[in-house]
Image (spheres, grey):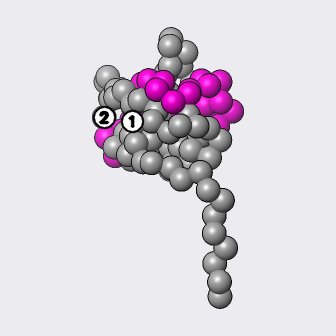
Amino acid sequence: MNGEPLVQKVVITNPQGFHMRPMAAFAQLASHFESSVKVCREGQSVNGKSILDLMLLAAAQGSELTLEVAGSDAQAALDALVQLLKMPTEDEPPQPTVA
């Protein structure tokens, strides 16, 4: 699929903003797709597959991010990444599992 990238805006709802854990999950998920993933905020565009790039966005709660995805699996990538960003995140340490 060539041509225009798929674009969707997402507002960060997490009270902590788009912080390290969701950034890491986002970059990891984006890396599973062949398509290129760009994340834009206030005119700044970064590689969505790079956690270091994502940190540059400094997206607090209420920030609007624009996702631009282009490639053969763009729709699947966009759907998965938007769903990840919209998921409520629990900022609690993981509970140890008892064997």
Q: Which mark is residue 1?
A: 2
Residue at x 65%, y 83% (from the top left corner): 98
The amino acid beneath tag 1 is Gly
Q: Residue 69 sits in which quadrant?
A: top left
How far separated are the C-alphas under marks 2 and 1?
6 Å
Drawn side of residue 4 relative to residue 13, left or right = left
Dot 2 or dot 1, earlier in sequence:
2
The part of the chain drawn in magenta is: 48-76
Disc 1 element: loop
Residue at x 50%, y 11% (from the top left corner): 43
Residue at x 45%, y 48% (from the top left corner): 88
Q: Residue 64 sits in which quadrant?
A: top left
Q: Quadrant of the N terminus?
A: top left
Task: Tell me residue 87's x, y (percent).
Answer: 42, 48
Observer-nearest of 91 and 65 = 91
Q: Is residue 38 above or below residue 14?
A: above
Q: Residue 18 sits in which quadrant?
A: top right
Residue at x 62%, y 46% (from the top left corner): 21
Q: Is residue 58 magenta?
A: yes
Q: Residues within 10 Å of mark 2 (few under 14, many from 20)?
A: few
The amino acid beneath tag 2 is Met
- The residue identified by callout 1 is 71
Q: For the image shown, how many numbered marks are present on the structure? A: 2
Observer-nearest of 75 and 66 = 66
Disc 2 element: loop
